[in-house]
Image (spheres, rainbow, N blue to C red):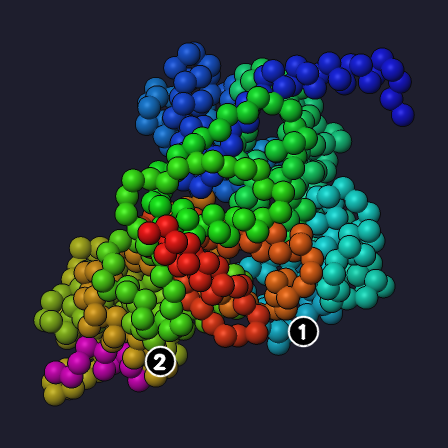
Amino acid sequence: MMNTTQENSELNYLKSLKQKTIKIFGPPGTGKTYTLIERVLKGHLRNGVQPQQIAFLSFTNKAVNTARERALEAFPHFSSDDFYRFNTLHKYCRRFFDEEVFDPKDCMIDYALENSIVKSSDTRLSDDDFTYKDWSLQVYSKARNLRVNPTEAYKSESYKRDNIDVFLRKIQTYESYKAHGKQKPFIDFDDMIQRAVKEVTFPSLEILILDEAQDCTPLQWDVIYKMSKNVRRIYLAGDDDQGIYKWNGADSRYFTEYFPGRKVRLRKTRRFGEAIHHFSQIIRRGIEGSIEKDYLPSNQKGYVKSYQQFSKIPFNEEKGTWFILGRINTTVNELRMLAKDAGLYFKDNHGNKCFDEKQWKAIKAWTKINNDKKLNKLEAQNLYRYIRELTEADYRTEKFWSAEPDFKEYGFEELKQWCGLDLDDKAKKKPWYWILRRNFKPGQTRNFIRLLRRYGQKELDVEPKIIIDTIHSVKGDEADHVVMYSKTNYPSNFKTKNKSDKTDERKVWYTGATRAKKSLHLLRTDYKYSYPIGSDYLIYVQEKQNDK
């Protein structure tokens, strides 16, 4: 219990906090991040504030790196090292601890196997996103971020995949693994935040900037509050309607209500025109507790259209960048298969292309020699390694290449000898993929040939203009055209009476729809678990007709 003196001291600090904090509210595309970088950050740098005295925090490395790069472009006399306080919140807290970080992507699989959480045959073991696949550990992480007892968090979950005894056993085993795994203790990402709140004395700073503030959990807000006591000026930017991380404990009310500050509202989006603005507002109407936002669309044209077949979406007709978005990973995988069948050249938001890079390098090399051109050393190695991998043959060891000069070039005859391309002259005249297709799966061969015929080799050398991923993955980004797939693979929250769950889902779809700059394409499905895009679209069409 605080005494009267403590209460008065806290009240006085909250008043001072309001005076030194500016909260920037802005709907999608209104320039929140632009304002933070171009006006706030650069403005203070021009006025003599040193970058070492500025903390720029966001939730993605991409956002942090963008801020650092733009600052360096404008102020080239600084170095990248001067901006060492530009970090994700977790990384910023990590700087204060010596223990090795327990990265679930590196360690979780061993832990899961050792404790029978998954079987060795489980397909999830090959999933790069294995981080917290186990339901109980997801709930445990959420409890820590909400600052509540794990049992309380467990009871609040409407759908329980483990019983309470299994839930508590997994937590105990998990904590034991961190304490004793690999002969030394680890800390995980939640530990970094928890310990920072309890143990760290944060340095005095001139400026604290926090982007995407609506995505902070109560535990993370404890860090921000503690940092604020040693900061002269604070800037927070966010949009409560894009708060899509409630599943991990994020609570946008800390940004909108609880953390004091003066409010600045951005009133015009630069991203999309009236059509997409209108449709996104229909989605937003169902977001309970949303702060009213009276903002204007851009002047550019655009449109919204609904489809029931993927093949009808005009990928060839509409030039520019594309997002093809699913709600969860399983529906994204479906979208990737549809895109392959349609012969689309795409990648995910991590840069992974729709074909294997090893295959592509081998194909490019084979195409070149099939056109009677020589390969450089690197190209010859790429072809050699892939063919060797496919056939498990022992043509030459890797040591052979180290003895070869870098300037040497290799024609077809040399490769016949050194790489095992032992083809007769008649075979050499066959299509470029002949030597490789014998080891391709039929679908791989078909898709590769289709891509090359459609785009050509030069086009496939550049980055794809189509990204297929989850809505969460592209948050903060934008594309000329966006496809949203309504299907999910779990009981839809729209089938329940829980208004909170419905609100959370609408925030996700609102975030997805507002990534679009020029056109929004709604891929509908009659699958039993779906977001009601169809009904929202009918409302949109009806309101457009009434406006005429």
Q: Which mark is residue 443?
A: 2
**Label placed on residue 119:** 1
Residue closest to the eye, 139 or 543 = 543
- Quick check: is 215 in the magenta stretch? no
Locate residue 251, reporting x and y percent: 65, 42
Left or right position of 294 against 494: left
- Identity of the amino acid at label 2? Gly
Q: Position of residue 10 (x, y in %)?
A: 76, 18
Q: Is residue 52 above or below residue 62?
A: above
In this rendering, the count of numbered labels is 2
Q: Is residue 354 left or right of residue 110?
A: left
**Quadrant of residue 234 within the rendered picture:** top right
Q: Position of residue 493 (x, y in %)?
A: 63, 62
Q: Mark 1 packing: few (<14 Cα in 10 Å), some, or many (20+)?
A: some
**Magenta segment boundaries in residue numbering:** 429-438
Q: Amino acid at mark 1?
A: Lys
Main SS, magenta region, reads loop
Which residue is pictured at 69% across the width and 38% down the height?
218
Depth check: 15 or 276 in front?
A: 276
Residue 339 as seen in the image, left or right of residue 422: right
Q: Is residue 529 above or below residue 137?
A: below
Question: Per the image, is 437 magenta?
Answer: yes
The residues bearing labels 1 and 2 have C-alpha atoms spaced at a distance of 29 Å
Q: Is residue 262 above or below residue 213?
A: above
**Quadrant in which residue 17 is drawn:** top right
* Image quadrant containing the N terminus: top right
